[in-house]
Image: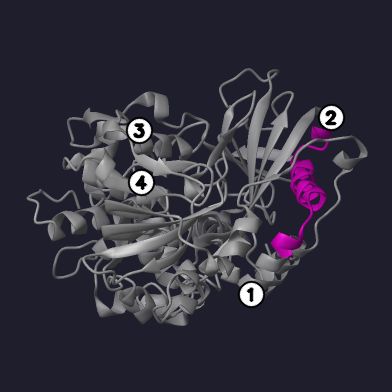
Amino acid sequence: MNEVTRRDFLAGTLGLLALTGCPVRSRATSRKIEGEIKGQDAARGHLLRSGELLSKRIDETIDVPVLVVGAGVSGLSCAWRLRREGVPRDDVLVLELASAPGGNAASGKNDVSPYPWGAHYLRAPTAESRGLTAFLEEIGVVRGRDSKGRLDFDTRFVCSEPVERIFEGGVWSEGIFPPPRSGSAEDRAELSRFRRELCALSRRRDEKRRRPFAIPVDRSARTDDLLALDRISFDDWLSSPERGKPFASRALLWLLEYGCRDDYGATLATTSAWAGLHYHLARGLEDDDLPDDERDHGTTLVWPEGNGWLVSKLVSARGGTRLETDRIVYRLEPDEKGGAAALAWDPVRSRAVRYRARHVVFAGARFLLSHLLEEPPEGLAEFEYAPWLAANVTLDRAPAGVGAPLSWDNVLYESPSLGYVVATRGTRAEEPQVITWYHAFVEGSTLEARRRLHSMSYEEARDMCLADFERAHPRIAESVRRVDVWKWGHAMIRPRPGFLWGKAREAAQAPIGNLLTANSDKGGIPIFEEAFFQGALAGEEILAREGKAFVSLL
Protein backbone atom coordinates (compact mmCIF):
# COMPACT_ATOMS: atom_id res chain seq x y z
CA MET A 1 0.00 0.00 0.00
CA ASN A 2 1.32 3.46 -0.87
CA GLU A 3 1.91 5.67 2.15
CA VAL A 4 -0.66 8.44 2.51
CA THR A 5 0.89 11.69 3.69
CA ARG A 6 -0.81 14.04 6.15
CA ARG A 7 -1.07 16.61 3.38
CA ASP A 8 -2.78 14.07 1.08
CA PHE A 9 -5.17 13.09 3.84
CA LEU A 10 -6.11 16.62 4.78
CA ALA A 11 -6.50 17.66 1.16
CA GLY A 12 -8.93 14.81 0.56
CA THR A 13 -10.84 15.50 3.77
CA LEU A 14 -11.11 19.23 3.15
CA GLY A 15 -12.45 18.53 -0.30
CA LEU A 16 -15.24 16.48 1.21
CA LEU A 17 -15.91 18.95 3.98
CA ALA A 18 -16.19 21.78 1.48
CA LEU A 19 -19.65 20.38 0.81
CA THR A 20 -20.76 21.97 4.07
CA GLY A 21 -21.04 25.32 2.35
CA CYS A 22 -22.59 23.94 -0.84
CA PRO A 23 -25.74 21.89 -0.19
CA VAL A 24 -26.17 18.96 -2.58
CA ARG A 25 -29.48 18.36 -4.25
CA SER A 26 -31.08 15.05 -3.44
CA ARG A 27 -33.08 12.86 -5.76
CA ALA A 28 -35.70 12.95 -3.01
CA THR A 29 -36.80 16.41 -4.13
CA SER A 30 -38.57 14.88 -7.13
CA ARG A 31 -41.43 14.01 -4.74
CA LYS A 32 -43.16 16.03 -2.07
CA ILE A 33 -41.55 15.63 1.35
CA GLU A 34 -43.04 17.61 4.19
CA GLY A 35 -41.08 19.18 7.03
CA GLU A 36 -39.93 22.45 8.55
CA ILE A 37 -37.17 24.24 10.38
CA LYS A 38 -37.70 23.85 14.11
CA GLY A 39 -35.71 24.98 17.11
CA GLN A 40 -34.30 28.25 18.31
CA ASP A 41 -36.44 31.32 17.69
CA ALA A 42 -34.44 33.80 15.60
CA ALA A 43 -36.84 36.64 16.48
CA ARG A 44 -36.12 36.21 20.20
CA GLY A 45 -32.41 36.19 19.51
CA HIS A 46 -32.77 39.44 17.59
CA LEU A 47 -34.61 41.08 20.50
CA LEU A 48 -31.73 40.14 22.77
CA ARG A 49 -28.98 41.32 20.43
CA SER A 50 -30.64 44.59 19.42
CA GLY A 51 -30.99 45.93 22.96
CA GLU A 52 -34.47 47.24 22.24
CA LEU A 53 -35.91 45.49 25.29
CA LEU A 54 -33.89 47.77 27.58
CA SER A 55 -36.40 50.55 26.96
CA LYS A 56 -39.37 48.49 28.18
CA ARG A 57 -41.26 49.66 31.25
CA ILE A 58 -41.14 47.12 34.10
CA ASP A 59 -44.66 45.79 34.69
CA GLU A 60 -43.98 43.65 37.76
CA THR A 61 -41.27 42.88 40.32
CA ILE A 62 -40.93 39.34 41.68
CA ASP A 63 -38.76 38.41 44.66
CA VAL A 64 -37.38 34.89 44.98
CA PRO A 65 -34.52 33.45 47.09
CA VAL A 66 -32.75 31.77 44.12
CA LEU A 67 -33.11 32.62 40.45
CA VAL A 68 -31.58 30.40 37.75
CA VAL A 69 -31.41 31.78 34.21
CA GLY A 70 -31.45 28.93 31.70
CA ALA A 71 -33.21 25.53 31.84
CA GLY A 72 -30.54 23.48 30.13
CA VAL A 73 -28.71 20.69 31.94
CA SER A 74 -26.64 23.07 34.11
CA GLY A 75 -29.58 25.19 35.25
CA LEU A 76 -31.77 22.20 36.01
CA SER A 77 -29.00 20.34 37.86
CA CYS A 78 -28.40 23.45 40.00
CA ALA A 79 -32.07 23.48 41.00
CA TRP A 80 -32.02 19.71 41.61
CA ARG A 81 -28.94 19.99 43.85
CA LEU A 82 -30.68 22.59 46.00
CA ARG A 83 -33.88 20.55 46.28
CA ARG A 84 -31.83 17.49 47.25
CA GLU A 85 -30.61 19.42 50.30
CA GLY A 86 -34.13 20.37 51.30
CA VAL A 87 -34.42 23.83 49.75
CA PRO A 88 -38.17 24.25 49.07
CA ARG A 89 -39.24 23.94 45.45
CA ASP A 90 -40.79 27.40 45.37
CA ASP A 91 -37.57 29.02 46.63
CA VAL A 92 -35.79 28.25 43.35
CA LEU A 93 -37.17 29.71 40.11
CA VAL A 94 -35.73 28.69 36.73
CA LEU A 95 -36.31 30.92 33.69
CA GLU A 96 -36.00 29.63 30.13
CA LEU A 97 -35.86 31.55 26.84
CA ALA A 98 -37.43 28.72 24.81
CA SER A 99 -40.89 27.24 25.15
CA ALA A 100 -39.51 24.04 26.71
CA PRO A 101 -36.50 23.13 28.87
CA GLY A 102 -33.51 21.18 27.62
CA GLY A 103 -31.00 23.49 25.95
CA ASN A 104 -28.55 21.40 23.92
CA ALA A 105 -30.32 18.28 25.18
CA ALA A 106 -33.64 19.29 23.57
CA SER A 107 -35.89 16.59 22.16
CA GLY A 108 -39.03 16.23 20.12
CA LYS A 109 -41.79 13.74 19.37
CA ASN A 110 -44.08 12.74 16.53
CA ASP A 111 -46.65 9.99 15.99
CA VAL A 112 -43.87 7.44 15.48
CA SER A 113 -41.47 8.10 18.34
CA PRO A 114 -39.71 10.61 20.57
CA TYR A 115 -36.32 11.67 19.17
CA PRO A 116 -33.31 13.83 20.11
CA TRP A 117 -32.46 17.22 18.68
CA GLY A 118 -29.11 17.51 20.37
CA ALA A 119 -27.16 15.37 22.86
CA HIS A 120 -28.42 11.81 22.48
CA TYR A 121 -26.48 9.54 24.85
CA LEU A 122 -24.58 9.36 28.13
CA ARG A 123 -21.55 7.24 28.81
CA ALA A 124 -21.23 5.51 32.18
CA PRO A 125 -20.05 8.14 34.68
CA THR A 126 -16.48 7.93 35.90
CA ALA A 127 -15.38 7.83 39.54
CA GLU A 128 -14.91 11.62 39.48
CA SER A 129 -18.56 12.24 38.47
CA ARG A 130 -20.01 11.53 41.91
CA GLY A 131 -22.88 13.98 41.66
CA LEU A 132 -24.10 12.57 38.37
CA THR A 133 -23.88 9.05 39.76
CA ALA A 134 -26.04 10.13 42.71
CA PHE A 135 -28.64 11.54 40.33
CA LEU A 136 -28.66 8.37 38.20
CA GLU A 137 -29.14 6.31 41.36
CA GLU A 138 -32.00 8.55 42.40
CA ILE A 139 -33.90 8.11 39.14
CA GLY A 140 -33.24 4.35 38.91
CA VAL A 141 -30.80 4.27 36.01
CA VAL A 142 -28.13 2.96 38.40
CA ARG A 143 -29.45 0.01 40.43
CA GLY A 144 -26.38 -0.54 42.60
CA ARG A 145 -22.89 -1.95 42.19
CA ASP A 146 -21.54 -5.34 41.18
CA SER A 147 -19.04 -7.47 43.10
CA LYS A 148 -16.15 -5.36 41.77
CA GLY A 149 -17.76 -2.08 42.76
CA ARG A 150 -18.73 -1.15 39.21
CA LEU A 151 -22.03 0.58 38.56
CA ASP A 152 -24.92 -1.74 37.75
CA PHE A 153 -27.31 -0.15 35.26
CA ASP A 154 -30.93 -0.85 34.51
CA THR A 155 -30.56 -2.78 31.26
CA ARG A 156 -33.54 -0.97 29.71
CA PHE A 157 -31.29 2.06 29.30
CA VAL A 158 -28.10 0.33 28.13
CA CYS A 159 -27.45 0.50 24.40
CA SER A 160 -27.75 -3.03 23.08
CA GLU A 161 -25.72 -4.63 20.32
CA PRO A 162 -25.04 -3.80 17.60
CA VAL A 163 -23.90 -0.40 18.86
CA GLU A 164 -22.20 1.00 15.77
CA ARG A 165 -21.34 0.28 12.15
CA ILE A 166 -19.50 2.00 9.30
CA PHE A 167 -20.32 2.29 5.59
CA GLU A 168 -17.79 2.31 2.78
CA GLY A 169 -17.89 1.16 -0.83
CA GLY A 170 -21.45 -0.15 -0.69
CA VAL A 171 -20.89 -2.27 2.42
CA TRP A 172 -21.72 -1.84 6.11
CA SER A 173 -19.22 -3.25 8.61
CA GLU A 174 -19.59 -3.70 12.38
CA GLY A 175 -17.70 -1.14 14.46
CA ILE A 176 -16.27 2.06 13.00
CA PHE A 177 -12.68 0.92 12.38
CA PRO A 178 -11.21 -0.11 10.07
CA PRO A 179 -13.35 0.88 7.04
CA PRO A 180 -14.55 -2.31 5.28
CA ARG A 181 -12.95 -1.74 1.87
CA SER A 182 -9.84 0.41 2.30
CA GLY A 183 -8.80 -0.67 5.82
CA SER A 184 -5.48 -2.48 5.89
CA ALA A 185 -3.04 -4.22 8.22
CA GLU A 186 -1.04 -0.97 8.31
CA ASP A 187 -4.12 0.91 9.53
CA ARG A 188 -4.70 -1.60 12.31
CA ALA A 189 -1.02 -1.45 13.27
CA GLU A 190 -1.18 2.34 13.55
CA LEU A 191 -4.30 2.09 15.71
CA SER A 192 -2.47 -0.34 17.98
CA ARG A 193 0.49 2.04 18.23
CA PHE A 194 -1.86 4.93 19.06
CA ARG A 195 -3.53 2.84 21.76
CA ARG A 196 -0.15 1.95 23.28
CA GLU A 197 0.62 5.64 23.61
CA LEU A 198 -2.79 6.20 25.21
CA CYS A 199 -2.13 3.41 27.70
CA ALA A 200 1.18 4.98 28.70
CA LEU A 201 -0.49 8.36 29.20
CA SER A 202 -3.38 6.87 31.16
CA ARG A 203 -1.02 5.57 33.87
CA ARG A 204 0.28 9.05 34.66
CA ARG A 205 -0.65 10.68 37.98
CA ASP A 206 0.16 14.05 39.49
CA GLU A 207 1.15 14.67 43.12
CA LYS A 208 -2.51 14.56 44.15
CA ARG A 209 -2.95 11.18 42.41
CA ARG A 210 -5.28 12.69 39.81
CA ARG A 211 -5.70 11.01 36.44
CA PRO A 212 -4.26 12.94 33.48
CA PHE A 213 -7.65 13.42 31.80
CA ALA A 214 -10.80 13.41 33.90
CA ILE A 215 -14.49 14.31 33.84
CA PRO A 216 -15.09 16.97 35.02
CA VAL A 217 -12.09 18.65 33.41
CA ASP A 218 -10.97 20.41 36.58
CA ARG A 219 -10.46 17.07 38.33
CA SER A 220 -7.61 16.33 35.87
CA ALA A 221 -3.89 16.21 36.70
CA ARG A 222 -2.01 19.52 36.57
CA THR A 223 1.57 18.62 35.58
CA ASP A 224 3.27 21.16 33.32
CA ASP A 225 3.92 18.73 30.47
CA LEU A 226 0.30 17.59 30.38
CA LEU A 227 -1.08 21.12 30.47
CA ALA A 228 1.34 22.09 27.68
CA LEU A 229 -0.61 19.74 25.40
CA ASP A 230 -3.38 22.32 25.37
CA ARG A 231 -1.14 24.83 23.62
CA ILE A 232 -0.75 22.73 20.47
CA SER A 233 -3.31 21.21 18.14
CA PHE A 234 -4.14 17.51 18.10
CA ASP A 235 -2.89 17.49 14.52
CA ASP A 236 0.50 18.84 15.65
CA TRP A 237 0.74 16.23 18.41
CA LEU A 238 -0.01 13.37 16.01
CA SER A 239 2.67 14.57 13.59
CA SER A 240 5.29 15.61 16.14
CA PRO A 241 8.67 13.89 15.65
CA GLU A 242 9.41 14.48 19.34
CA ARG A 243 7.03 11.71 20.37
CA GLY A 244 8.03 9.26 17.65
CA LYS A 245 7.01 8.37 14.14
CA PRO A 246 4.13 10.59 12.92
CA PHE A 247 0.79 8.90 12.42
CA ALA A 248 0.00 8.80 8.71
CA SER A 249 -2.77 6.20 8.29
CA ARG A 250 -5.59 7.83 6.35
CA ALA A 251 -8.16 5.65 8.12
CA LEU A 252 -6.76 6.34 11.59
CA LEU A 253 -6.57 10.09 11.01
CA TRP A 254 -10.15 10.03 9.76
CA LEU A 255 -11.21 8.16 12.92
CA LEU A 256 -9.48 10.64 15.21
CA GLU A 257 -10.91 13.61 13.35
CA TYR A 258 -14.35 12.02 13.48
CA GLY A 259 -14.06 12.06 17.28
CA CYS A 260 -13.18 15.77 17.23
CA ARG A 261 -16.13 16.57 14.98
CA ASP A 262 -18.47 14.39 17.03
CA ASP A 263 -17.73 15.83 20.48
CA TYR A 264 -16.39 19.30 19.67
CA GLY A 265 -17.55 20.32 16.19
CA ALA A 266 -13.87 20.77 15.31
CA THR A 267 -11.04 19.29 13.23
CA LEU A 268 -7.69 17.85 14.25
CA ALA A 269 -6.18 21.26 13.51
CA THR A 270 -8.74 23.23 15.57
CA THR A 271 -8.84 20.90 18.59
CA SER A 272 -6.18 21.19 21.26
CA ALA A 273 -4.06 18.08 21.76
CA TRP A 274 -5.19 17.98 25.40
CA ALA A 275 -8.86 17.91 24.32
CA GLY A 276 -8.18 15.34 21.61
CA LEU A 277 -6.55 13.00 24.13
CA HIS A 278 -9.26 13.70 26.70
CA TYR A 279 -11.83 12.34 24.24
CA HIS A 280 -10.04 8.98 24.21
CA LEU A 281 -8.82 8.78 27.81
CA ALA A 282 -11.22 10.54 30.19
CA ARG A 283 -13.50 7.50 30.45
CA GLY A 284 -10.66 4.99 30.49
CA LEU A 285 -9.64 2.51 27.81
CA GLU A 286 -11.07 -0.83 26.78
CA ASP A 287 -7.85 -2.66 27.64
CA ASP A 288 -7.63 -5.81 29.75
CA ASP A 289 -4.09 -4.89 30.84
CA LEU A 290 -5.32 -1.83 32.74
CA PRO A 291 -6.58 -1.88 36.33
CA ASP A 292 -10.35 -2.19 36.56
CA ASP A 293 -10.84 1.41 37.73
CA GLU A 294 -8.92 2.71 34.70
CA ARG A 295 -10.83 0.71 32.10
CA ASP A 296 -13.71 1.80 29.93
CA HIS A 297 -16.29 -0.97 30.22
CA GLY A 298 -18.15 0.33 27.20
CA THR A 299 -21.53 1.14 28.74
CA THR A 300 -23.55 3.66 26.75
CA LEU A 301 -26.91 4.83 28.07
CA VAL A 302 -29.53 5.76 25.48
CA TRP A 303 -33.18 6.76 25.25
CA PRO A 304 -35.43 7.34 22.21
CA GLU A 305 -35.47 11.10 22.94
CA GLY A 306 -31.75 11.13 23.75
CA ASN A 307 -30.71 13.16 26.78
CA GLY A 308 -34.09 14.86 26.68
CA TRP A 309 -35.17 11.92 28.86
CA LEU A 310 -32.64 12.96 31.51
CA VAL A 311 -33.87 16.55 31.22
CA SER A 312 -37.42 15.40 31.98
CA LYS A 313 -36.14 13.60 35.08
CA LEU A 314 -34.21 16.68 36.24
CA VAL A 315 -37.38 18.75 35.84
CA SER A 316 -39.59 16.31 37.77
CA ALA A 317 -37.20 14.95 40.44
CA ARG A 318 -37.78 15.73 44.14
CA GLY A 319 -41.09 17.51 43.83
CA GLY A 320 -40.39 19.11 40.48
CA THR A 321 -38.80 22.32 39.25
CA ARG A 322 -40.45 25.71 39.49
CA LEU A 323 -40.03 26.67 35.87
CA GLU A 324 -41.14 29.58 33.68
CA THR A 325 -40.56 29.20 29.95
CA ASP A 326 -40.80 31.88 27.24
CA ARG A 327 -38.77 34.35 29.30
CA ILE A 328 -36.21 36.44 27.44
CA VAL A 329 -33.75 37.59 30.10
CA TYR A 330 -32.25 40.73 28.59
CA ARG A 331 -30.33 42.26 31.49
CA LEU A 332 -28.46 40.86 34.49
CA GLU A 333 -27.68 43.15 37.43
CA PRO A 334 -25.05 41.33 39.49
CA ASP A 335 -24.67 43.89 42.27
CA GLU A 336 -28.22 44.43 43.44
CA LYS A 337 -28.25 45.28 47.15
CA GLY A 338 -28.41 42.02 49.08
CA GLY A 339 -28.14 39.89 45.94
CA ALA A 340 -28.65 40.26 42.21
CA ALA A 341 -31.45 40.84 39.72
CA ALA A 342 -32.57 39.97 36.20
CA LEU A 343 -34.92 41.71 33.77
CA ALA A 344 -36.99 39.46 31.51
CA TRP A 345 -39.44 39.97 28.70
CA ASP A 346 -42.49 37.73 28.41
CA PRO A 347 -43.23 37.64 24.65
CA VAL A 348 -46.47 35.73 25.14
CA ARG A 349 -48.08 38.38 27.38
CA SER A 350 -45.89 41.33 26.21
CA ARG A 351 -44.75 42.16 29.73
CA ALA A 352 -41.40 43.05 31.31
CA VAL A 353 -40.63 41.57 34.73
CA ARG A 354 -37.88 42.37 37.22
CA TYR A 355 -36.75 39.35 39.26
CA ARG A 356 -34.82 40.05 42.46
CA ALA A 357 -33.00 37.27 44.32
CA ARG A 358 -30.41 36.66 47.00
CA HIS A 359 -28.65 34.37 44.52
CA VAL A 360 -28.75 34.52 40.73
CA VAL A 361 -27.16 31.81 38.59
CA PHE A 362 -26.63 32.40 34.89
CA ALA A 363 -26.75 28.96 33.25
CA GLY A 364 -26.70 29.97 29.59
CA ALA A 365 -23.87 30.06 27.04
CA ARG A 366 -21.16 32.41 28.25
CA PHE A 367 -21.04 34.50 25.07
CA LEU A 368 -24.52 35.82 25.90
CA LEU A 369 -23.06 37.82 28.77
CA SER A 370 -21.87 40.36 26.20
CA HIS A 371 -25.57 41.24 25.68
CA LEU A 372 -26.78 40.79 29.25
CA LEU A 373 -24.28 42.75 31.33
CA GLU A 374 -23.67 46.48 31.24
CA GLU A 375 -19.98 45.73 31.85
CA PRO A 376 -19.24 42.27 30.38
CA PRO A 377 -16.18 40.40 31.69
CA GLU A 378 -13.04 40.22 29.59
CA GLY A 379 -12.22 37.14 27.57
CA LEU A 380 -15.68 36.37 26.16
CA ALA A 381 -14.26 36.34 22.62
CA GLU A 382 -12.11 33.36 23.60
CA PHE A 383 -15.24 31.22 23.93
CA GLU A 384 -15.80 29.79 20.45
CA TYR A 385 -18.88 27.76 19.51
CA ALA A 386 -19.43 25.22 16.75
CA PRO A 387 -22.54 25.53 14.56
CA TRP A 388 -24.48 22.32 13.85
CA LEU A 389 -27.38 21.09 11.76
CA ALA A 390 -29.57 18.24 12.97
CA ALA A 391 -32.39 16.51 11.11
CA ASN A 392 -34.99 13.98 12.15
CA VAL A 393 -36.15 11.84 9.24
CA THR A 394 -39.35 9.83 9.58
CA LEU A 395 -39.40 6.72 7.40
CA ASP A 396 -42.04 4.16 6.48
CA ARG A 397 -39.54 1.40 7.26
CA ALA A 398 -35.99 0.91 8.46
CA PRO A 399 -33.17 1.73 6.03
CA ALA A 400 -31.74 -1.37 4.38
CA GLY A 401 -28.13 -2.11 3.46
CA VAL A 402 -25.56 -4.77 2.65
CA GLY A 403 -23.44 -6.15 5.48
CA ALA A 404 -23.73 -5.38 9.18
CA PRO A 405 -27.29 -4.83 10.48
CA LEU A 406 -28.80 -1.50 11.46
CA SER A 407 -27.09 -0.18 14.58
CA TRP A 408 -27.75 2.57 17.09
CA ASP A 409 -24.91 4.65 15.57
CA ASN A 410 -24.42 4.50 11.80
CA VAL A 411 -21.35 6.23 10.35
CA LEU A 412 -20.45 6.94 6.71
CA TYR A 413 -16.69 6.76 6.14
CA GLU A 414 -15.26 10.10 4.98
CA SER A 415 -18.66 11.73 4.82
CA PRO A 416 -18.78 15.39 5.91
CA SER A 417 -21.62 14.41 8.26
CA LEU A 418 -21.50 12.46 11.51
CA GLY A 419 -23.94 9.86 10.21
CA TYR A 420 -27.17 9.00 11.97
CA VAL A 421 -28.57 7.39 15.11
CA VAL A 422 -31.74 5.34 15.21
CA ALA A 423 -34.14 6.47 17.93
CA THR A 424 -36.62 3.66 17.23
CA ARG A 425 -34.20 0.74 16.92
CA GLY A 426 -35.90 -2.34 18.29
CA THR A 427 -39.08 -1.95 16.28
CA ARG A 428 -39.64 -4.29 13.35
CA ALA A 429 -37.91 -3.36 10.08
CA GLU A 430 -41.19 -2.91 8.23
CA GLU A 431 -42.57 -0.48 10.81
CA PRO A 432 -42.09 3.33 10.73
CA GLN A 433 -38.76 4.59 12.05
CA VAL A 434 -37.22 7.90 13.08
CA ILE A 435 -33.54 8.40 12.34
CA THR A 436 -31.55 11.41 13.56
CA TRP A 437 -28.76 12.88 11.43
CA TYR A 438 -26.05 15.29 12.56
CA HIS A 439 -23.72 17.62 10.68
CA ALA A 440 -21.07 19.84 12.28
CA PHE A 441 -19.86 22.87 10.32
CA VAL A 442 -16.14 22.58 10.98
CA GLU A 443 -14.39 24.43 8.14
CA GLY A 444 -13.50 28.11 8.02
CA SER A 445 -14.17 30.58 10.80
CA THR A 446 -17.08 29.88 13.10
CA LEU A 447 -18.65 33.20 12.05
CA GLU A 448 -18.57 32.20 8.38
CA ALA A 449 -19.89 28.74 9.18
CA ARG A 450 -22.70 30.19 11.28
CA ARG A 451 -23.70 32.52 8.45
CA ARG A 452 -23.77 29.58 6.01
CA LEU A 453 -25.95 27.63 8.40
CA HIS A 454 -28.42 30.45 9.06
CA SER A 455 -28.67 31.35 5.36
CA MET A 456 -29.75 27.83 4.40
CA SER A 457 -33.36 27.39 3.40
CA TYR A 458 -35.37 24.43 4.61
CA GLU A 459 -35.05 22.83 1.17
CA GLU A 460 -31.26 23.21 1.17
CA ALA A 461 -30.92 21.72 4.64
CA ARG A 462 -33.26 18.84 3.79
CA ASP A 463 -31.42 18.09 0.56
CA MET A 464 -28.03 18.13 2.29
CA CYS A 465 -29.32 15.54 4.74
CA LEU A 466 -30.97 13.28 2.15
CA ALA A 467 -28.01 13.45 -0.26
CA ASP A 468 -25.83 12.14 2.55
CA PHE A 469 -28.31 9.33 3.30
CA GLU A 470 -28.43 8.38 -0.37
CA ARG A 471 -24.74 7.52 -0.37
CA ALA A 472 -25.59 4.47 1.74
CA HIS A 473 -29.29 4.08 0.96
CA PRO A 474 -29.86 4.99 -2.74
CA ARG A 475 -33.63 4.43 -2.66
CA ILE A 476 -34.32 5.87 0.75
CA ALA A 477 -36.42 8.73 -0.71
CA GLU A 478 -39.16 6.22 -1.47
CA SER A 479 -39.79 5.66 2.24
CA VAL A 480 -39.26 9.19 3.58
CA ARG A 481 -42.40 10.61 5.19
CA ARG A 482 -41.02 13.80 6.65
CA VAL A 483 -37.77 15.66 7.33
CA ASP A 484 -37.56 18.27 10.10
CA VAL A 485 -34.36 20.20 10.73
CA TRP A 486 -32.88 22.23 13.60
CA LYS A 487 -30.18 24.87 13.23
CA TRP A 488 -27.83 25.12 16.20
CA GLY A 489 -25.93 28.38 15.73
CA HIS A 490 -23.92 28.05 18.97
CA ALA A 491 -24.24 24.33 19.59
CA MET A 492 -21.19 23.58 21.69
CA ILE A 493 -18.04 25.11 23.11
CA ARG A 494 -15.01 24.32 20.94
CA PRO A 495 -11.79 23.43 22.88
CA ARG A 496 -9.35 24.96 20.44
CA PRO A 497 -5.62 25.15 21.22
CA GLY A 498 -4.83 27.29 24.25
CA PHE A 499 -8.40 27.54 25.56
CA LEU A 500 -8.86 24.76 28.13
CA TRP A 501 -5.97 25.76 30.36
CA GLY A 502 -5.86 29.41 29.28
CA LYS A 503 -6.65 32.61 31.14
CA ALA A 504 -10.19 33.11 29.77
CA ARG A 505 -11.52 29.81 31.08
CA GLU A 506 -9.66 30.28 34.36
CA ALA A 507 -11.26 33.72 34.83
CA ALA A 508 -14.69 32.25 34.05
CA GLN A 509 -14.62 30.22 37.27
CA ALA A 510 -15.01 33.35 39.41
CA PRO A 511 -18.41 34.95 40.17
CA ILE A 512 -19.28 38.27 38.54
CA GLY A 513 -20.18 40.38 41.54
CA ASN A 514 -23.04 38.49 43.18
CA LEU A 515 -23.73 36.59 39.95
CA LEU A 516 -22.79 32.90 39.73
CA THR A 517 -22.39 31.14 36.39
CA ALA A 518 -22.96 27.48 35.53
CA ASN A 519 -22.55 25.94 32.09
CA SER A 520 -20.36 23.42 30.29
CA ASP A 521 -18.43 26.40 28.83
CA LYS A 522 -16.72 26.74 32.21
CA GLY A 523 -15.30 23.24 31.85
CA GLY A 524 -14.46 23.77 28.19
CA ILE A 525 -15.79 20.36 27.09
CA PRO A 526 -19.37 20.23 25.73
CA ILE A 527 -20.66 17.05 27.36
CA PHE A 528 -23.60 16.28 29.64
CA GLU A 529 -21.36 15.33 32.57
CA GLU A 530 -19.58 18.70 32.53
CA ALA A 531 -22.83 20.66 32.31
CA PHE A 532 -24.29 18.66 35.19
CA PHE A 533 -21.19 19.17 37.34
CA GLN A 534 -21.11 22.93 36.79
CA GLY A 535 -24.78 23.26 37.72
CA ALA A 536 -24.42 21.14 40.86
CA LEU A 537 -21.30 23.12 41.78
CA ALA A 538 -23.27 26.38 41.63
CA GLY A 539 -25.93 24.79 43.80
CA GLU A 540 -23.35 23.84 46.42
CA GLU A 541 -21.90 27.37 46.33
CA ILE A 542 -25.35 28.74 47.17
CA LEU A 543 -25.71 26.25 50.02
CA ALA A 544 -22.34 27.37 51.40
CA ARG A 545 -23.28 31.06 51.11
CA GLU A 546 -26.49 30.34 53.00
CA GLY A 547 -24.51 28.64 55.76
CA LYS A 548 -26.27 25.30 55.30
CA ALA A 549 -24.52 22.12 56.45
CA PHE A 550 -24.23 19.57 53.66
CA VAL A 551 -21.98 16.80 52.37
CA SER A 552 -20.59 17.65 48.94
CA LEU A 553 -21.50 15.34 46.08
CA LEU A 554 -18.63 16.71 44.03
Residue 139: image quadrant is top left
- Classify 332 as above or below 305: below
Residue located beneath label 1 in the image? 445
CA distance for labels 3 and 4? 10 Å
The question of residue 470 being in magenta is answered with yes
CA distance for labels 1 and 2? 37 Å
- State left or right for residue 532 relative to residue 542: right
- State left or right for residue 267 relative to residue 515: right
On the image, the x and y values in percent for residue 2 come to 69, 66
CA distance for labels 3 and 2? 41 Å
Residue located beneath label 2 in the image? 478
Residue 299: image quadrant is top left
The question of residue 23 being in magenta is answered with no
On the image, the x and y values in percent for residue 144 come to 21, 29
SS of the residue under disc 3: helix
Residue located beneath label 4 in the image? 76
Q: Of label 3 and label 2, which has the lower sequence position?
A: 3
- Classify 176 as above or below 110: below
Comparing 385 with 209, the one in front is: 385
Q: Can residue 410 be seen at all in this image of the molecule?
A: yes
Q: Quadrant of the N terminus?
A: bottom right
Which label sits in the foreground, 4 or 1?
A: 4
Q: Please give the range of residues in magenta.
A: 452-478
Residue located beneath label 3 in the image? 316
CA distance for labels 2 and 4? 41 Å
Q: Type of residue at label 3?
A: Ser
Is the stretch drawn in magenta largely helix, strand or loop? helix
Q: Type of residue at label 1?
A: Ser
